[in-house]
Amino acid sequence: QVTLRAGAELDAHRVNQYRLILRAACPGEDEVEGQLFVRVTTGQVLRCDTPFASAEGDVVQVLADVAPRTPLYAVLRQPLGGLTGFSSPSFLQFRLRNHNTPLRLTRRGLVLAPDNGFDPSKDTQTFRLEIEVMDRHGHNCSGAVRVEVLPSRRPRVTFLEPHRAVTVTEGIGPREVVTQVHARGDNVRYAILAPVAPMLFTIDEVTGEIRSTRRLEVTRAHLLIRAYNALHPDDHATATVNITVQGTDRQAPRCVPAIFVSQVPEMVSPGSTLVTLRCTDSTDGCLHYALEGPPSSHSHFCMEGPQLKVNATLDYDSEAMAALGFQFTATIVVTVGGQPLQSTRVPVLVTVTPVNEFRPACPNSATFTVPETAAFGNVVGRVAGTDRDYPPDSLEYSVEGGSGPAQPFSIDRHTGEILVVGPLDSQQQKSYRLVVRLTDTHNDLDLRKRQSRLCDVSVHLQAVPDQLPVCIPEVQELRITAGSPGSRQPVTRLVCHSSPHSAVLAYTLVGGNEDGRFRLEGNTLVYLPNGQAEPRTFVLLVEVWGGSGARRRSSMVALVVHVTPWSTPVPPSTTTQHTTLQKEPLVVTQTEAVWHPPAWFVAVLTISGALLLATLGCMAQNLLCGPACAECLHSKEETCKPTGRITATPGGITAPRRTPVALSHHSCLSSTQGQFDGRAQDPCTGRDYLFNSVTGARRWI
């Protein structure tokens, strides 16, 4: 039985489900485990959350320029809420106790701003709303909300250019953009105040674009433009725009250069002038210069009159510059009086070139460990130098002093990998210090402007214990046929290895080669025939050396070589001459599995077989003898009586001796009347019998 602990309080809004793990076990049985889930649901009690239900009430701060009927506070909202206990506000009723406030309370518990908004001219204003909430069951709770209206911090509406003069060419069609005005502020809208009924132009209320209403002819127009805050119309400003429509007999200006292509180093300072255009107009009108192009060009360059200047640092060593291909494209538009139709366009292409600014940097750690058995060309480690110039980490590596007997290491020029190029011996030298030079590449147009840095690199040798050379097999028995004298006859090749496998082994004949008939060529044994006439067996000892210096270790290999003389046939008495072709001997090694039992095993097996045959013969005789043999044996019969035991002799195993006992016919008959004082078992037949120790009489039982 699961009960609620005394004093416990459940709150479905904080924890709505509990998971209990129950374990139970009966005596002598395994423990079982189960889970119990307890779900907590909300009760039908209406409660108002704090701080809404507190005496001071909840506080909301808004600006005075908030739009009319803007929701300011929600008595019940998700996920935050002023009420708990119900998930839907449709079952609740909200009532405003005090009505001396311009704020409004909706049926869904929303507090709205006044219909006409707040008065922005006043200082901080405070409104208190006392609200009562009731559900359909009659449960209710109440709370208060204090709304503090703060002075507006919004900027005032102002024109960036209060007076503007625009000249356009006749022939502009309807709805074409003539010019555009800009005002600073919030929720800015535009309108034409004068003329009251404009005939030639109209303005976009949102963007401020002034467009033509029909095809324009030569004329002059004066417009008075108002910009105002749509939420607060009292916040407004005015500007004048003079538009001159002139004829089309004017020509576009001519500029030198007509196209501008240049390379600038990345170190050029902002404000530097790249080019100054020399433009002329036939009417000597006012020329306007503007820069068009992608945002990257606008952020790095600007126009000051006819001068194209650098506006920001041109950092070559950045991914953003690499994404642009280190080039900027733009167009300088030169117009007469701001008239688009009378304009000249000058293309601009600026390429940023690199400057070698930074020196290479050494890695934080440049210590490596390599086993002394490392082979030629093994990689010890990599020197990871860095360079902040673009392209990043474009370095070349070199070892000061080069490689040699005292420096068994080299470095890859491009990757910085340190390689083993000489023998290593930890007993002679346990560590090496390398001075690696890092030199940057491709970081400047002038290849002579390269920077470098020296880095210290330590390489420690790890000692590796040497092992004895291992040869397979360690003993070989070979048979060869001797060739002709003076020839060279390979016999076998020794297969040996050491640890490490790359170690060089040395082979030496140390025994069995007194007459010098054999010699070693590397790991190959060679026989030098001398024309001997008799077969001969040589037992050779070869010592295999591995390692170097004081740590050299060796193993011994035994070679048994049976040499058979080369047989040359005797020529017959005829004059025919026989020539025997000399062939290189072919050595074939064949292994056969043969079992040679010892002599004692053969002797025991023979005697055991003989005893088994004798026992089988006696059993067969006993079965064929019949009932007549049950009373007595014939006098000529011989029976075996064991008189000894099995003994071991130098020549083998001796079986027990058997003594024949002769029983006369008289003794056989008298045995039926006499007394028997003993009982025994015949070793041949296995049958029991009675016997008289005085007369020797026997009787089968």
Image (cartoon, rainbow, N blue to C red):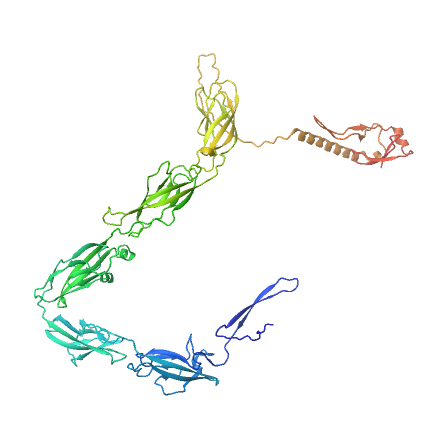
Quadrant showing the N terminus: bottom right
Quadrant showing the C terminus: top right
Residue lying at the far right of the rendered structure: 673
State the residue in front, 514 or 214.
Answer: 514
Q: In this image, 562 relative to 306: left or right?
A: right
Residue 164 location, x and y as percent? 16, 73
Residue 655 location, x and y as percent? 74, 29
Please give the name of the residue rendered at 24% of the width and 81% of the height, measured from the top-left corner. Answer: 234
Please give the name of the residue rendered at 41% of the width and 77% of the height, measured from the top-left corner. Answer: 77
State the residue in front, 155 or 231.
Answer: 155
Residue 137 location, x and y as percent? 48, 84
- Residue 146 sits in quarter: bottom left
State the residue in front, 148 or 197.
Answer: 148
Q: Is residue 109 among the parts visible in the rendering?
A: no
State the residue in front, 16 or 451.
Answer: 451
Query: Relative to 574, is 365 above or below?
Result: below
Query: Relative to 24, is 633 above or below?
Result: above
Q: Is residue 454 among the parts visible in the rendering?
A: yes
Q: In this image, 183 relative to 123: left or right?
A: left
Q: In this image, 34 relative to 361: left or right?
A: right
Residue 608 location, x and y as percent? 71, 32
* Number of dots carrying numbers: 0
